[in-house]
Image (cartoon, grey):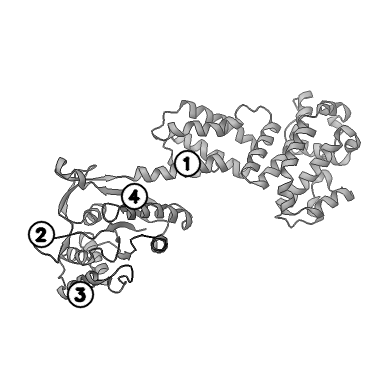
């Protein structure tokens, strides 16, 4: 793990008594949390000392005052300044047209060394590895994409365990904004796990006359707003609340969101209902320390309200199937649809005898009813049977990643000997597009032929439960 400060560098101003030397004006910077102050012309130096960073990445244009960075950090680390190098770099920058050419890594290598010398001077354990990155002004699309490439190069140097700090005090206002956006993109694209943003700092030179110092403010709550937005979006649209759970300070609320995310991904429906009801209560009652929760609560409740108060397992499974389909999670949709049909029929038996359990053996009896009795010859149940068989066959195909053969498709104990040509025909014609395109009609038909089938109540009389086999 490394602590890395990423800072921007501008062109500075010419000293009043010297028309060749550029510098930032010296200022007193104060950290508001500790009251500690630094008098320096480089806020990056103050941040490096205060945070005890391992390396410093400086981002600027070819016209930025790289020669002053070299002089300042060499002097601050009590190293001798090579005046010839300073002059050479200064003249090179002065004569360079940044739209035609850029400073090279080789030309800036001694600047990198000077920064590392400073970091090791203030903290002997610093790993080093500081770098200067040259970007364009960003005047047109070409330059913007060139800058994009540079930012992605920075991303390639970051690892998941790094602790990142940003300084956006200097340079064109567009560069800190660009850096802020790019860091979020790097975080999403490159890293499997979020690296830690330790701070987003801005030295408020604007109020130095009023306050007598430039307060260094940490704007990371603004950056965290993007995390909250993404966390809420992922939870509401995909049921993945892992990021949101990490951000929520209320531990019980965080646990509920985490549990729901796990359940949605593994599809354990019974536990889902309990966790949804608990989450609803917490959202209504929780006094969260997180300022954004009160704004997000109405949107989180739209997710909760969709499932809250559903009393039957079959209705919850159907509702989840619809939600999965809307968010293109087709495999889970098929699983829930198939189980919703079995649950709905089993509920009719349980309405007659509450001692009938929700166990797998009893669910197999319902599958036995569909596949091995004359249930499917009755006109009022024929469509239900055909529907379940097609949904179940597709679900089994999905469970085997599309590679199931006939034996695997029909390995369920309840229908292992079912070999009708009609059902085999269904299996051989299914491809992934068919499976997706038919979901809408499957859900509609599940409501019509199962949930709205007024004859379902007759099933326990026509096919007594104790006469059904689960084998």
Residue at disc 4, secondary structure? strand
In the rendered image, which quarter contains the C terminus? Answer: top right
Q: Identify the residue under disc 1.
A: 244
Along the viewing direction, whichever of 457 and 123 lies nearer the viewer = 457
Label 4, label 2: how far apart the Cα atoms are? 37 Å
Q: Residue furthest front?
A: 140
Label 3, label 1: how far apart the Cα atoms are? 52 Å
In the rendered image, which quarter contains the N terminus? Answer: bottom left
Which is closer to the viewer, label 3 or label 1? 3
Which badge, 3 or 1, is on the more N-terminal residue? Answer: 3
Which badge, 3 or 4, is on the more N-terminal residue? Answer: 3
Q: Identify the residue under disc 2.
A: 16
Which is closer to the viewer, label 4 or label 2? 2
Contact flag, marks 4 and 2 (Cβ < 8 Å):
no
Q: Residues within 10 Å of mark 2 (few under 14, many from 20)?
A: few
Along the viewing direction, whichever of 184 and 242 lies nearer the viewer = 184
Residue at disc 3, secondary structure? helix
Rendered location of residue 98, percent (x, y):
30, 68
Which badge, 4 or 2, is on the more N-terminal residue? Answer: 2
Which is closer to the viewer, label 3 or label 2? 2
Label 3, label 4: how far apart the Cα atoms are? 37 Å
Contact flag, marks 3 and 4 (Cβ < 8 Å):
no
Along the viewing direction, whichever of 14 and 289 lies nearer the viewer = 14
Q: Identify the residue under disc 4.
A: 198
Label 1, label 2: how far apart the Cα atoms are? 52 Å
Q: Identify the residue under disc 3.
A: 88
Residue at disc 1, secondary structure? helix
Quarter assignment of residue 295: top left
Which is closer to the viewer, label 3 or label 4? 3
Q: Residues within 10 Å of mark 3 (few under 14, many from 20)?
A: few
Q: How many marks?
A: 4
């Amino acid at each position: 793990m490394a602590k890395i400060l990423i800072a921007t560098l501008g062109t500075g101003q010419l000293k009043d008594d010297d028309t060749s030397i550029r510098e930032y004006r010296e200022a007193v910077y104060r950290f508001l949390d500790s009251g500690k102050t630094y008098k320096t012309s480089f806020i990056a130096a103050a941040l490096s000392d205060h945070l005890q960073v391992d390396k410093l990445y400086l981002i600027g244009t070819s016209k930025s005052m790289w020669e002053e960075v070299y002089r300042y950090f060499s002097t601050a680390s009590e190293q001798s300044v090579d005046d010839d190098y300073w002059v050479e770099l200064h003249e090179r920058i002065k004569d360079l047209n940044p739209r035609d050419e850029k400073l090279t890594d080789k030309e800036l290598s001694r600047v990198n060394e000077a920064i590392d010398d400073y970091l090791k001077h203030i903290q002997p354990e610093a790993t080093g590895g500081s770098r200067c990155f040259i970007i364009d002004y960003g005047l047109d699309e070409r330059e913007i994409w060139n800058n994009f490439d540079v930012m992605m190069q920075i991303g390639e140097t970051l690892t998941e365990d790094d602790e990142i700090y940003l300084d956006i005090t200097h340079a064109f206002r567009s560069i800190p904004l660009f850096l802020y956006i790019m860091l979020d993109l790097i975080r999403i694209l490159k890293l499997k796990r979020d690296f830690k943003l330790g701070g987003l700092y801005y030295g408020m030179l604007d109020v130095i006359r009023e306050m007598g110092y430039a307060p260094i403010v940490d704007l990371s709550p603004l950056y965290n707003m993007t995390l909250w937005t993404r966390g809420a979006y992922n939870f509401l649209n995909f049921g993945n609340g892992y990021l949101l759970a990490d951000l929520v300070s209320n531990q019980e609320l965080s646990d509920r969101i985490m549990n729901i995310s796990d359940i949605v991904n593994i599809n354990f429906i019974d536990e889902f209902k309990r966790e949804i009801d608990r989450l609803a209560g917490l959202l209504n009652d929780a006094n969260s320390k997180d300022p954004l929760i009160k704004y997000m609560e109405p949107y989180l409740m739209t997710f909760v309200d969709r499932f809250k108060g559903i009393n039957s397992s079959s209705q919850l499974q159907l509702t989840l199937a619809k939600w999965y389909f809307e968010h293109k999670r087709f495999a889970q949709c098929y699983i829930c649809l198939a189980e919703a049909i079995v649950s709905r029929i089993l509920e009719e038996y349980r309405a007659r005898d509450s001692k009938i359990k929700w166990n797998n053996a009893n669910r197999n009896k319902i599958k036995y009813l569909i596949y091995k009795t004359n249930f499917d010859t009755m006109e009022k149940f024929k469509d239900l049977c055909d529907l379940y068989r097609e949904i179940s066959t597709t679900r089994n195909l999905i469970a085997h990643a599309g590679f199931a053969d006939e034996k695997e498709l029909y390995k369920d104990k309840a229908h292992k000997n079912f070999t009708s040509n009609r059902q085999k025909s269904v299996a051989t014609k299914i491809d992934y597009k068919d499976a997706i395109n038919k979901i809408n009609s499957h859900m509609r038909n599940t409501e019509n032929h199962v949930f709205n089938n007024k004859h379902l109540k007759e099933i326990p009389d026509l096919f007594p439960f104790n006469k059904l086999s689960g084998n």
